[in-house]
Every structure is written in C-alpha cells, then in structure tokens.
Amino acid sequence: MKAKLTQILIVCLVGATTLSNVVVAQQPATTTSTTAETTIRDQQPIQQTPADITTGSPALQQLIEQALENNPEIKAMQRRFDMMRARIPQAKALDEPTLSVGYMGNIAPFTLQKGDPSSGRSISISQDLPYPGKRSLKGKIASTDANAEWWNFEQTRRNVVAEVKDAYFDLYYLTKAMGVVNKTKTLLEQFTKIAEARYAVGKGIQQDVLKAQVEFSKLIEQQTMLEQRKQIAEARLNSILYRESDSPIGVPDELKPRDFPYSLAELNETAITNYPELKSQRRKIEGAQYSIQLAKKDFYPDFSVGFTYINRPAMPEMYGVTVGIKLPIYTTQKQRPALTEANASFESEKRSLENKTTVLMFKIRDKYLAETTAQRLVKLYSTTIVPQSSLSLESAIAGYEVGKVDFLTLLDNLVTLLNYELSYYEQLSNEEKAVAGLEPLVGVTLRP
C-alpha cells in the first residue's frame, strides 16, 4: 500500500511540475522597439491583396485567407464598391441627345398635302449642354463616393480578419482550458483513490473521500461547460468563414507571450493616418466640397443645341440650327436652397469626422489598456503565481505523504493551481484578442 501511494504521489509531482514548466517556458520574448516602431510607421493599408493582414501562424493564416475569399459580407462590400465605381463615367457623361421625326400634312402619317408648299417632313436632333465645369464636378463627386466606398470595403475586410482572430484565440483558450481540466481531473482521480485507500485501512476520514468526489464532480461540470463553449467558438469561426457550422477546425497553434512595444501615442498617430473609416470620411468631405462648387455652378444657365432638316417636295429643302438657354430664374426656390443644402452637408461631414475620430481614440485606448493589462497578468502568472502554486502543490503532496498536511489542504492546492493555469491561458488569449481588435482601428497589422 505504501509503495502504491508513493508511486501515485510521484505521478502527481511530475504532473504538477509539467504544468509549471509549460508556463515558465512561455515567458515573453523581447524584441527591439526600434524595429517595431519602423514597422508601424512604414506599413500602409492594403490596396488589392490581403498580404499584410495575414499572420505568421500557418493555421490562422489559412483561416484568414478562407474568410477573405468566402465571407459574404466582404463579397457584398466588393460589389457595392463596383457599383459606386460604375457611376463615375455615368456622372461625367452628357445627357442623351433627342432625335425627333415629324411631318405636316394629311392625317394619314407622313402623307403630304398636294398643292400646299408648307407641307413637308422633318427630322431634328438636339443635345443639352451643361454649363462648363458641371460634368467635371459631377465626375469628381462620383469618384470621391467610390473612393469612400473602397475604404468602407477595406474596413470590412479588416473587421472580418479581426473577427477570425478573435474567434481563433477564443478557441485556443478553450482548447488549452480543457487540457488543463483533463490533467487536473486525472490527478484528482489519483487523490481520490488515495483517500479511499487510507479510509479503508482506518488512516483517513470519510470527509476526505466525499470532498474529493465533490471536487471531481465540479471538474466534470467545468469540462462540460468548456466543451459547450468550444463548440460555440467553432461554430462562430465557421460562420465567419462561410462554412458549415460543424466543419472541422483543427487544434489551434501554440501561443507564446510576445512583446507589444507600441505606445498609445504611436497607435493614435497611426490610426489618424491609416484608419479606413477616417479615410472614407475624408473622401466624403471632399465630395461635399465638390457639391458646394456644383451648387454654385447651378446659378449659371445650361444650354442646348439642335439641328433640323425639312423635306418639302414642292419647295427646296430647308436646314435649321437652334440654340437654347435655360434661364435660372427660380433661384430662391431651387439654387439657393440647393447651395444651403450643400453647405449643411459639408458641415455635417466635418462634424462626423470629428465624432469618428473621438470615438476611435476611445476604442484604441480601451483595447490598448486591455492588451497591456493582459500582458502584465500573463507575465505575473508565468513567472510568479503559477510556479509558486506548483511548488505549493508539491509541498502539500510531500506533507500529505508523511501525514503533516491534511487531505483538504492538498485538494485546495490542486484547485488553486488549476484556477491559475486557466487564468494564465485566458489572459494570454485576451492579449492576442486585444491586439487583433486594435489592428482594424489603426489600419495596419501589429503582429505579422
């Protein structure tokens, strides 16, 4: 019995040491801030390819590529951009010319009255000509609208990538958490057998056995809940990839703590330059300025020109040229209100830019604080709390073997180590999710 107890305790020690070594081995790697600062300043948003929004993890990179290729939201935004771009040549084009065919004669179509020299057939064509500069301004407005839509499309792509990463890192945590719970459950099974054996020979108490069984049931409950959350995370990831909800995902790659050398000021500066929504809003402001110029042009008249040919059999053929001008005499009802509307739209777009900038600064700060807090906790767990908890469990095992520590203390140390292990992986996942949430806000990839 004593040999069996010693063998089991050795297994427990090895398991606890393994849990500690896994965490300690994953301490953050240092990187030079100079290189990182150069990356964040020099990298530009994507134009036509998703090369700079992929990641170094092969599994995650493959998922991102599938999302960029299959996600219906991205496809919808792509078609919307195509729609807006197709409006540019339409806006710059002239109105269609008008072709007219007529006659003056009998009621029967195109028959002339005999003996009436004014009876004849005619054909004419006319073309409306807007005041010089109007077509160019309409083309510029359509172009800025299409450009704004492009950056909305770009924002959608980056948001989808961030969603993929968020779901992927959530799945990573749940996978690691299930592994930790399974290891702890194995150790607890051994502890339960020890308690039962000691109780059978009169060296233990029934309370130890019952307490071990309760803790084992809790672990089964925790494992069940984690399994449910894992299935939900997989279904969420598959929905982003536009796949069947039960499509296999695979095991996420191992994560290691990484340095995050960017300051809040650097992130804000980069976001002001590269955030797609701000770029889109600036294009809208530019378009509103063109609309003001166009509204001012409407105070000037448009023109029309026409050519007419008249065929009169009893008389020589006739040709005519017409020039028309539209008189903007209803300026108080049309042109002036239109100019007021254009000015109001311009001011509205400017205020919208200010609001989006303010909201953006808040979102960046929120994600930045989440990242830095998670990073500190990851370091604290990996270098201090988990190793100390592991040593405390080893000490409790050794004390229990010689009768200096009761069974409840042993269980408490095991549960404590479990909780800290789960917290470590949760914070490691939260750190990566915070960085993923920052990337669409600053418009660049922070972790290739």
Image (cartoon, helix red, strand yellow):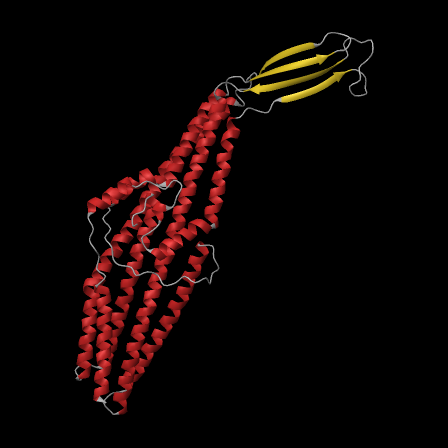
Instruction: Let me know if residue 235 appears in the view.
Output: yes
Q: Which residue is drawn at 40% across and 37% down?
A: 280
Residue 445 location in percent, x, y? 32, 47
- Residue projecting furthest to the bottom: 201
Q: Is residue 302 above or below residue 12?
A: above
**127 over 160 or under it: above or below:** above
Point 48% across, 49% down: residue? 72
Q: x%, y% of residue 376?
A: 22, 56
Position of residue 215 measured from the top left corner of the image (x, y, whole percent):
31, 77
Left or right of 122: which side holds 220? left
As drawn, 30 above or below 230: above
Observer-nearest residue: 100 or 178? 100
> Which quarter of the picture shows residue 37?
top left
Identify the residue at horizontal 26%, vertical 84% (top origin): 194
- Viewer-side residue, 261 vs 300: 261
Quarter where residue 426 is shown: bottom left
Image quadrant holding the N terminus, namely bottom left
Residue 413 shows in the view:
no
- Image coordinates for residue 257, horizontal then vertical, percent: 25, 57
The answer to whether residue 407 is left or right of residue 97 is left
Number of callouts in the render? Answer: 0
Q: In this view, does 13 lie to the left or right of 209?
A: left
